[in-house]
Image (cartoon, rainbow, N blue to C red):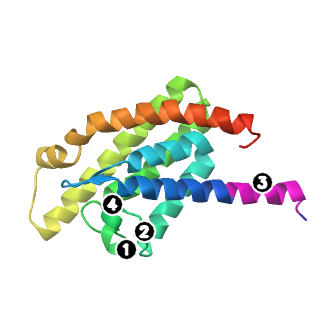
Amino acid sequence: MQTEAAVRGKTYDMVYIGIFTVLIAVCSWISIPAAVPFTLQTFGVFMAVEVLGGKRGTMAVLVYILMGAVGLPVFAGFQGGIGIIFNTTGGYIVGFLCSALIMWAAEALFGKKPAVRILSMIAGLIACYALGTVWFMVIYGRTTGAVGLMTVLGWCVIPFVIPDLVKIGLAYALSGKLRKVMAGMGIQ
């Protein structure tokens, strides 16, 4: 039988996961159209893992992806459905989960030192770019015709590198402040 504190802890975990799932969705709706829409989704992913930690943050990302997969309009452009995931940009969406898992693994292996946190976000971003780029090339090749790696990088990665590094810096700075506020309130 679980204690009241354990039940309360699980309830809080579900609430935090829900809040950060919504944050990622809201960040996805802030969008500038391009071949791959410029959104704040990666910022939401980074914030979720940075603030909630690896396990809960990764769960928030997974719930976000599952909500979109079942048709809720949580993806960029208020879109949802499994078709979005199996489209050209779906690899970047799945890549968010890879980013979260990499950040979680780094936290588990090396702790939450500042350098580890920043490097894990960069490594997660690179994994997201890699998976998304390969996915884009495969789907685009099947539906439209073969496309070169440099072309896809020019469409889907290079324009986003600097904004994504800015998002990493913002997530690093804001998550630290938010964690301090939460700790001061006895939340965490």
In the picture of the structure, the residue carrying the numbered disc 2 is: 68
Q: Are marks 3 and 2 in contact (CB under 8 Å)?
A: no
> 78 or 6, which is in the foreground?
78
Label 1 vs label 3: CA separation?
A: 32 Å
Residue with the mark numbered 4: 76
What residue is at 61 percent from the left and 45 percent from the top?
52
Is residue 158 placed above or below 29 in the rendered structure? above
Q: Earlier in the sequence, mark 3 or mark 2?
A: 3
What residue would you read off at disc 3?
9
Q: Disc number at residue 140?
A: none
Residue carrying label 1? 81
**Which stretch appears magenta?**
2-13
Name the residue at 66% across, 58% down: 15
Name the one closer to the observer, 86 or 17: 17
Tell me the amino acid under the disc marked 1: Gly
Q: Earlier in the sequence, mark 2 or mark 1?
A: 2
Of callouts 3 and 4, the N-terminal one: 3
The three-letter amino acid code for the residue at tag 4 is: Ala
Q: Residues within 10 Å of mark 1 (few under 14, many from 20)?
A: some
**152 in relation to 3, above or below:** above
| Distance CA(mark 4)–CA(mark 1) | 12 Å
In whole angstroms, how far apart are the C-alphas of marks 2 and 1? 6 Å
Give the residue drawn at x 49%, y 47%.
100
Tell which circle, 4 or 1, labels the residue nearer the N-terminal end. Answer: 4
